[in-house]
Image (spheres, rainbow, N blue to C red):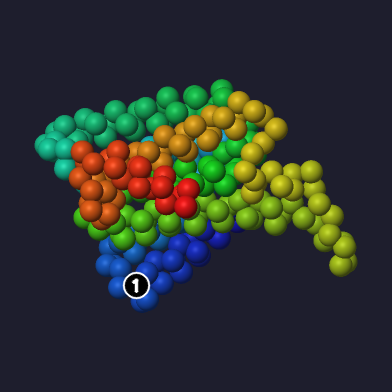
Amino acid sequence: MHITTSTVLGVGYGAGGYLLLDVPETSCLLATGLCSLSGMLPDLDSDTGVPLRESIAFTAAVVPMLLIDRLTHLGMDTEAMVLVGGLIYVGIRFGLAEVLKRYTVHRGMWHSLPAAAIAGLLAFLLCSCDSLFLQSYKAFAVVTGFMSHLVLDEIYAIEWKGVVPRFKRSFGTAIKFYSSNTWANISVYAKLAVLVVFAVADPLLMSHFGYHHSDMHLMAKDLIDQIIR
């Protein structure tokens, strides 16, 4: 159900980008795939079984490919990119999988709104390109797929007997801002803060607002001033 729903949303998302926003076909197809497969991402916190295995395998395979443009801008040749891609695959496929098994619980903070934001920011940083709009478009495709999973979890946490709904104990454990675990909350929001800093420092975003990399402190100051106002 999760992958079917996110796939349908992905097709609509890609078609909307192509028909309404004049997004290039290849970007629309990539966004469709990212939205579709992101419907599995919240199940990275599954302790065992197919959801965890499939989600990890997908993430390990896709992340190195999304990094090709950014690695190219770093001046790496083909052999170096293959080596880095292989190391990233191994790190995610085995290292990340082990960390998730040890330190996450199902329906914990990885099933939450800040986790969806983390997934979107990671996608923004990974999907580097020459257009801020296209980079954001693909990142939001990941958020859309991720959120479809959370929404479905909440919908299936409601049972209807006639016109009277009965809420399961799992209701409210997917779409949330925090959990009962303080350290899990701190960990997730710390990761979110770090990713926000990296996203703000992205050269494409900085140039869009008229800043250079050396002007990052000025951009941060202006953003803080606007928030305060």
Q: Residue at horizontal 50%, vertical 25%?
A: 99
In the rendered image, the vertical position of residue 19 relative to residue 106, given as above or below? below
Does residue 87 appear left or right of residue 98 in this picture?
left
Q: Position of residue 36 (x, y in %)?
A: 46, 56
Q: Which residue position is annotated with label 1? A: 21
Q: Quadrant of residue 73?
A: top left
Q: Position of residue 214 (x, y in %)?
A: 21, 38
Q: Amino acid at mark 1?
A: Leu
Does residue 150 appear left or right of residue 88 in this picture?
right
Q: Position of residue 39 (x, y in %)?
A: 52, 51
In this view, the residue in front, 120 or 218, is 218
In the rendered image, the vertical position of residue 124 relative to residue 191, given as above or below? below
Q: Position of residue 123 (x, y in %)?
A: 38, 47
Q: Residue at horizontal 46%, vertical 45%?
A: 119
In the rendered image, the vertical position of residue 122 relative to residue 8, given as above or below? above
In the rendered image, the vertical position of residue 88 relative to residue 29, given as above or below? above
Q: Quadrant of residue 30?
A: bottom left
Q: Secondary structure at mark 1?
A: loop
Q: Is residue 39 visible?
A: no
In this view, the residue in front, 210 or 182, is 210
In this view, the residue in front, 10 or 225, is 225
Q: Residue at horizontal 57%, vertical 35%?
A: 45
Does residue 49 appear left or right of residue 192 in this picture?
right
- Viewport quadrant of the N terminus: bottom right
User: Label 1 crowding class (10 Å Cα cut-off): few <14, some 14-19, many 20+?
Assistant: few
